Image (cartoon, rainbow, N blue to C red):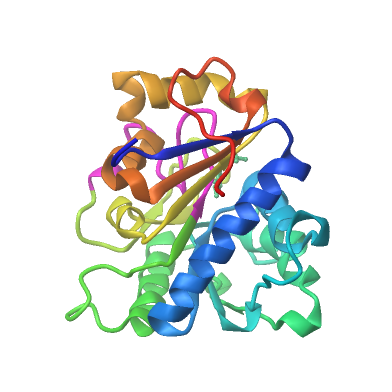
Amino acid sequence: MGKQPNLYSFENVDTQLAPNLRKYILERQSEAFDRHGVFRIATSGGSLPKTLAKALLDPASGSSQDKFEFGRWEVFYADERCVPLDHDDSNHKLVKAEWIDKIPAELGQPKVFTINEKLIDDPQEMADEYEKTLVSVFASRDSVKLPLFDLILLGCGPDGHTCSLFPEHPLLRETDAWVLSIKDSPKPPPGRITLSLPVVLHGANIAFVATGGGKKEILKQIFETEAGAKLPCGLVNNGAGERVSWFCDTAATEGVGYPRRSSVI
Ligand SMILES: O=C1O[C@H](COP(=O)(O)O)[C@@H](O)[C@H](O)[C@H]1O
């Protein structure tokens, strides 16, 4: 498959996709610990956190010998909605409820970098402040051109959006900023912040999770058409190639002609 993205497709989410995603993340964790002693991830909201929880927390989905060391994790948001952190639209609220709050105490607690909810009425200010947070963690912008996440976990919207980067939106042309604001998101809520495309493409590893029949038409477009290659998810595939892995179920990949794999092992 050379430098192309990996497309994994599993019959069952609980018994196949989740254990394979678990193995993949354990490998990324181990590489990151070897590299710099911490595991820095950026995560999305939407349908991803529920599936991710099965991979991270379900004892039936992996070997007990390989454990996540959440105490050495740093968790950032690939995108966030400009709402209070306890609002139902908040990606943080969802991620916290799905898995962060369920981590057994003995596995440690991740350091989580949320938005400043005092800035919900000013998305640009919120994006600037979140970028400063990244700068403080990933070192100064002068010496680091782009932050290097060990793993970026992404969803794929039915229109091909990922993070809060929407098809044909001018934000896709951003080349300088690390964190962008959007006031006119086509999907509610309208105010959001998002990692920029260059930051996503720079990720050491990028994993999409897309499940269910509602994703099959967009996956066909992304993997098989020129127009799909220009959608945000297609741009990630083309820009990051073999560093991209898709974790899907067969309902989502039905009819997709691109070569599929059934195990990360
Ligand atoms: O609005 C958003 O949507 C995308 C995709 O969500 P999904 O429910 O179709 O998986 C999500 O990745 C992003 O974080 C979220 O803000």
157 within the magenta span: yes
Quadrant of the image occupied by residue 44: bottom right
Q: Quadrant of the N terminus?
A: top left
- Residues 212 and 17: in front is 17
Taking the spot 54% from the left edge, 15% from the top edge, the residue there is: 255
Residue 170 pos. (x, y %): 27, 41
Closer to the camera, 161 or 225? 225
206 with respect to 59 (left or right)? left
- As drawn, 91 above or below 171: below
Residue at 67%, 54% in the rendered image: 52
- Magenta part mainly helix, strand or loop? loop
The total number of labels drawn is 0
Queried whether the magenta region covers residue 168, the answer comes back as yes
| In the depicted structure, whether residue 72 falls above or below residue 61 | below
Q: Residue at x 36, y 34 (%)?
A: 234
Residue 197 visible somewhere in the drawing: yes
Residue 16 location, x and y as percent? 71, 42
Q: Residue furthest top?
A: 255
Residue 66, position as x, y percentages in the image: 67, 70
* Image location of residue 4, percent across then percent down: 33, 38
What is the magenta range? 153-173
- In the figure, residue 22 lies in which quadrant? bottom right
**What residue is rendered at 63% in x and 49% in y?**
20
Q: State left or right for residue 84 relative to residue 164.
A: right
